[in-house]
Image (cartoon, rainbow, N blue to C red):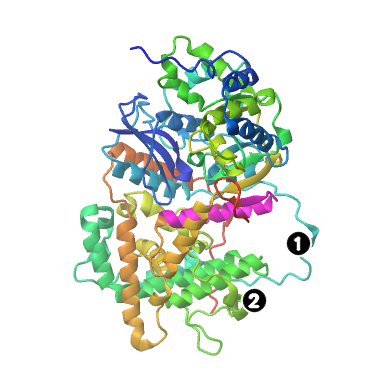
């Protein structure tokens, strides 16, 4: 079956900066240039700008803080058995990402501007200190597992395609994100805000992936963020209890686990905050 | 059929897909997460597979054959995630071997009070059970409560237990008192520290609200505490400011241990979780004295101000029946209730006991510590 061709500007072999220029060429829109400048300015500010974030769930976070290093709790399944052979999908992704060293030594994160990361991968979002993300850190313009699905998997040379979608933190992260954002800004009749940029950089399951080599340690964490959703749920369970509706066993354990996380973060002196989705608005401890 | 794609077992989060075994060609992929475990549709399976790079387990497979376990519907999936999550709570909370250097301002000064000598709670319960024997019941239910493991018999049995609340009262009281003794004993050396005092105050208050600790300063005590524990139990100022109905306290109260129970059971929370995860728990633990801990813990969970047991003799009995009824209702809802493939049941059971086995053995640690004096 013939698929429509991929956008030749985006999916090109040119450096990401050139792709941005090529995309902008010939687009005569009054707000596009201004928004382009704004997007760069918002992202490039070192103190409030981009971060590598890793979402982590409560038990994994407790283990990370206890062991003083990040490791995969489920290297071997904790319940049930392992596959008889390594997952074909995982092998394929490793192959396409062309890790030149042991792939198991790479830790996957996402690029974010504020916010609480990719919720599906854990309710706690660890933001790395910017100076702990090496400029040579590899990035990928999307969830690398999307390479296993159509339309990307149907391309004639998926390996070459994967190479086109990869880059390094420096110099590519700003250009890669700019190219992700600009098409969304076409036809805009106003200037963009930080909140919108933040949401466009990482929205739901849509993110730029970071592959950091080497283990991660608690002292490399700038802060741990969480979404108000969980806080509201916590309060709701407690309020329901006061109104005479007892918690379920799961709720009981969940509340207890969350309290353990707060205790551990306090113990280790790691800053933790509750932030709204776009990292603005209310922020509290 | 539904299959697990990626699963963070200890965090109660999983991606599952409607697909064939060992395929990524999914008709639907959903994400389920505690506490509500409501399925959230995920557009693409790649998000689910990518989770294995973010600390999720790769699927759920038979350890014998390596084949994926399959489930008929999301109700079964939800039950598996729920029970495995509860089972995860049976192991110790990960804590560093060596914590950070404490701030000098947190250093403790002053004399540490001499620890009181308090009877072992497990021995106290053991002794009480021996004295009480088996309560009579026209249907002989207390001779064998293994029916609690059977979904078809459970509800009727719990209704009988509710109707027999008065007969169970001495057992529940003995276990409640044993828990207080055990808490006092285990914390004897640290009871001067604020967190231990908070726990102590919260627990005595909880027992008071459940109707199992009527001690007043001047009344003849059924179970009295001496020494510093007595002073702390009446620390009204502290009581006033604490969140007194914090149910997660169950995970902080040491479980009184009968000799035949596993020494790896640390807290009342553990004693409650075991029957919620292991479907066959009550088949082995079918005596009334074995069912009491779960019933007692359920009473703690369901307790709200409107269910407080009155100190007025006229109301007390009705209040107790009501509270036991609510606890039975909660247990009916929480005990394993969805039918799962046998192989999956056995995985859940093994998992629960393996997790429990990660705790230190209290009997080994306390060799010879089961003797003591009754503090009366």
Q: Chain of mark 1?
A: B
Q: Residue drawn at (29%, 59%), measured in percent from left and top?
A: B332
Q: Where is B341 relative to A253, above or below?
A: above
Q: Earlier in the sequence, mark 2 or mark 1?
A: 1
Callout 1: 10 Å neighbours few (<14), some, many (20+)? few
Which numbered disc covers residue B106?
A: 1
Q: Does the magenta segment cover residue A256?
A: yes
Q: Are marks 2 and 1 in contact (CB under 8 Å)?
A: no
Side of B54 relative to B116 (left or right): left
Q: Position of residue B216 (x, y in %)?
A: 53, 86
Q: Does the magenta segment cover residue B101?
A: no
Residue B76 or residue B185, whichever sits in front: B76
SS at circle 2: helix
Q: Which residue is mark 2?
A: B228
Residue B274 or residue A254, whichever sits in front: A254
Q: Residue drawn at (34%, 79%), measured in percent from left and top?
A: B319
Residue A122 or residue A88, whichever sits in front: A122
In the rendered image, the residue lying farthest to the top is: A156
Q: Where is B77 relative to A154, above or below?
A: below
Q: Where is A85 relative to A223, above or below?
A: above
Q: Residue drawn at (31%, 49%), measured in percent from left and top?
A: B280
- Magenta residues span A250-273
Callout 2: 10 Å neighbours few (<14), some, many (20+)? some
Which numbered disc covers residue A48?
A: none
Q: How many marks?
A: 2
Asked whether the viewer can see residue A76, the reply is no
* Position of the N terminus of chain A by quadrant: top left
Q: Position of residue B83 (x, y in %)?
A: 38, 47
Q: Residue drawn at (28%, 51%), measured in percent from left and top?
A: B337
């Amino acid at each position: 079956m013939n698929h429509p061709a991929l956008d030749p500007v985006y999916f090109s072999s040119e450096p990401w900066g050139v792709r941005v220029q090529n995309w902008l060429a010939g687009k005569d829109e009054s707000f596009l240039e201004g928004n382009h400048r704004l997007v760069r300015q918002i992202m490039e500010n070192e103190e409030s700008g981009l971060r590598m974030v890793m979402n982590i769930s409560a038990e994994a976070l407790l283990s990370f803080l206890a062991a003083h290093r990040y490791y995969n709790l489920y290297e071997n399944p904790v319940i049930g058995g392992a596959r008889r052979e390594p997952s074909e999908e995982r092998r394929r992704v490793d192959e396409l990402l062309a890790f030149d060293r042991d792939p198991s030594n790479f830790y996957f994160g996402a690029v974010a501007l504020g916010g609480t990361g990719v919720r599906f991968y854990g309710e706690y979002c660890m933001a790395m200190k910017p100076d702990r993300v090496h400029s040579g850190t590899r990035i990928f313009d999307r969830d690398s597992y999307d390479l296993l699905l159509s339309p990307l998997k149907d391309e004639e040379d998926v390996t070459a395609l994967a190479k086109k979608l990869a880059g390094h933190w420096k110099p590519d992260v700003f250009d890669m994100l700019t190219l992700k954002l600009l098409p969304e800004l076409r036809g805009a009749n106003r200037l963009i805000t930080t909140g919108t940029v933040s949401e466009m950089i990482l929205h739901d399951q849509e993110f730029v992936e970071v592959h950091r080599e080497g283990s991660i340690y608690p002292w490399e964490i700038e802060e741990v963020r969480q979404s108000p959703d969980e806080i509201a749920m916590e309060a709701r369970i407690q309020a329901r209890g006061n109104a005479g509706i007892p918690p379920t066993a799961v709720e009981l354990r969940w509340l207890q686990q969350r309290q353990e996380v707060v205790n551990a973060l306090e113990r280790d002196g790691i800053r933790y905050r509750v932030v709204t989705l776009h990292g603005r608005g209310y922020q509290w401890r | 059929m539904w299959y697990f794609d990626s699963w963070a077992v200890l965090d109660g989060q999983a991606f599952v897909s409607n697909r064939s075994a060992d395929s990524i060609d999914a008709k639907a992929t959903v994400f389920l997460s505690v506490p509500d475990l409501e399925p959230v549709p995920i557009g693409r399976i790649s998000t689910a597979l990518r989770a294995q790079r973010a600390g999720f387990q790769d699927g759920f497979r038979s350890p014998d054959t390596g084949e994926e376990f399959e489930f008929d519907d999301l109700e079964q999936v939800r039950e598996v995630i729920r029970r495995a999550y509860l089972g995860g709570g049976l192991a110790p909370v990960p804590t560093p071997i060596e914590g950070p250097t404490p701030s000098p301002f947190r250093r403790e000064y002053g004399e540490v009070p001499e620890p009181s000598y308090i009877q072992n709670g497990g021995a106290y319960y053991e002794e009480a059970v021996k004295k009480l024997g088996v309560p009579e019941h026209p249907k002989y239910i207390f001779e064998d409560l293994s029916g609690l493991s059977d979904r078809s018999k459970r509800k009727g049995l719990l209704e009988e237990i509710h109707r027999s609340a008065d007969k169970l009262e001495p057992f529940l009281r003995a276990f409640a008192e044993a828990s207080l003794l055990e808490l006092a004993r285990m914390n004897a050396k640290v009871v001067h520290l604020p967190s231990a005092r908070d726990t102590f105050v919260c627990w005595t208050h909880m027992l008071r609200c459940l109707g199992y600790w009527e001690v007043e300063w001047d009344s003849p005590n059924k179970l009295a505490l001496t020494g510093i524990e007595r002073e702390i139990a009446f620390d009204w100022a502290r009581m006033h400011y604490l969140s007194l109905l914090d149910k997660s306290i169950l995970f902080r109260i040491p479980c009184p241990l009968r000799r035949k129970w596993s020494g790896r059971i640390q807290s009342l929370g553990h004693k409650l979780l075991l029957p919620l995860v292991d479907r066959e728990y009550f088949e082995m633990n079918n005596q009334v004295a074995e069912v009491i801990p779960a019933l007692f813990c359920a009473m703690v969970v369901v307790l709200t101000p409107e269910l407080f047991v009155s100190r007025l003799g006229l109301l007390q009995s009705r209040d107790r029946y009501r509270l036991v009824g609510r606890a039975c209702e909660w247990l009916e809802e929480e005990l394993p209730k969805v039918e799962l493939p046998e192989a999956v049941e056995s995985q859940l059971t093994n998992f629960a006991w393996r997790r429990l086995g990660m705790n230190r053995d209290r009997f080994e640690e306390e060799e010879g510590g089961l003797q003591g004096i009754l503090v009366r």
